[in-house]
Image: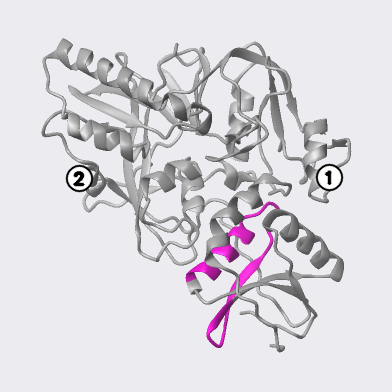
Amino acid sequence: MSNIKLSTLPSSLLPRLILLSLFLGGCQTLQPEPPQPAVIVEPGIAPESVATHEFELTGGQTLVGGLAAMKSRENDTLPDIARHFGLGYNDITWANPAIAPWAPAPDSKVLLPISFILPNSPHQGITLNLANMRLFYYPKKEPGKVYTYPIGIGRQGWSTPTGLTRIVTKKANPTWNVPPSIHKEHAQKGDPLPSAIGPGPNNPLGLYAMNLGFNSYLIHGTNKPYGIGMQVSHGCVQLYPEDIEVLFKKVGVGLPVRIVHQPYLTAWQDDSLYLEANPLLPKWSGQKPRLKKQLLADLRKMSAQKGVVVDWDKVERIVERADGVPTPILVQSPSISELAGAATLVKHPDRLYQQPEPEVIKDTDWAALVASFDSETDAQKLAAMLTHQGPMIPAHKVQKDNNYMVIAGPFKSKKELKNAAKRIRMDFELNVEPLEPNSVSVD
């Protein structure tokens, strides 16, 4: 390895880097095969799949799914695990606050919150609940069934609207006509865009798009799948590429779409009352006292009707924790830690769906020094964030003396390196140091 000048990057920058990396361009190519079903590991019981997207509804049921858990492996990230199990970034990070999303310690027990309370809305068409960033589809041709998918939504200043609308058009391989406001945003970043971007890996709409009755708002795929479960879009609703493909083929033009913001959801199941609390989006943060007051009134009414006793201290803890996990709230009901401890343990698949695997940097390849850290974990986080861009920016964590470097590569040409350097500068606000062939080798 050549003598590389090291400049240590402050760890405090990392939380901001992930958001920057998801706001602007980039793409990941859709692969045709679906995620492998997870296999339950329980002695003496035949293997079976864990339901993640499709659930049966019986007798007015409004709580679906269940909790599972899986042990992480080296080089896993929570976003990889989330995508494999039909969860968003919000779902898995809220449920696992003690685990570093981009660098979980191997053999960590990761809670998989594949349990959802349906929004308080008609079971018709599509309902989007912005509070927990999840879509629910009730197919007319399949009564008693619901499909659910995690979504990405509009960030602050580009909020996804609420209300009743419908799907007005559908388009496979869409062209993105870049709005003037986005033109301006990219120009200010030094990244001018063309007036339109056709089908292909650089199209942020992905492979499928459905226009809503709200002007300029769509439900579509994405070329940045690891932003699902975050507020990262310009107002549109994004799905994982594999999810939008399924939904696009199922729904028709004219289907009603309700967009709601319901952070507090309740449901009865097996004579137990459940509460799911989600963080309020910034747009509604000032309404928390009112919404909490209404929740408590509803719970008093629901418990009185069945003559049961609510554990009000537990309700308070759930509301403040706001982790999106449906939790029973009657007196002597199990706590979240007890529920997590009893969660079904599933076998780690041979490979998590679409988990990025950067190639080894050879002597003939170009590369780039992105940053250096005192902390191995911080270096691993940045390398993982780069690797999870779309398309992937391959990156490796490399130890040199007492520092941990993040090396991007391999790149097969100087031009390819320059393009990656521009993306890193735009998306992460970091300048890289080019490394010529034969100057670095990463195994």
Q: Is residue 379 magenta?
A: yes
x 43%, y 41%: residue:
91
Q: Provide residue 412's location: percent of width, then percent of height.
A: 80, 70
Q: Provide residue 104's location: percent of width, then percent of height.
A: 43, 61
Q: Provide residue 403's location: percent of width, then percent of height.
A: 55, 81
Q: Amino acid at mark 1?
A: Ala
Which residue is denoted by mark 1 in the rendering? 187
Distance from Cα at disc 2 to Cα at disc 1: 51 Å
Lower sequence index among marks 2 and 1: 1
Label count reads 2
Q: Nearer the viewer, residue 126 or 50?
A: 126
Instruction: Name above or below for residue 104 compared with residue 47.
Output: below
Which residue is denoted by mark 2 in the rendering? 338
Which structural element holds mark 2? helix
Q: Amino acid at mark 2?
A: Glu
Give the extent of the magenta segment: 377-404
x 69%, y 44%: residue:
223
Relative side of 123 to 236, left or right: left
Which structural element holds mark 1? helix
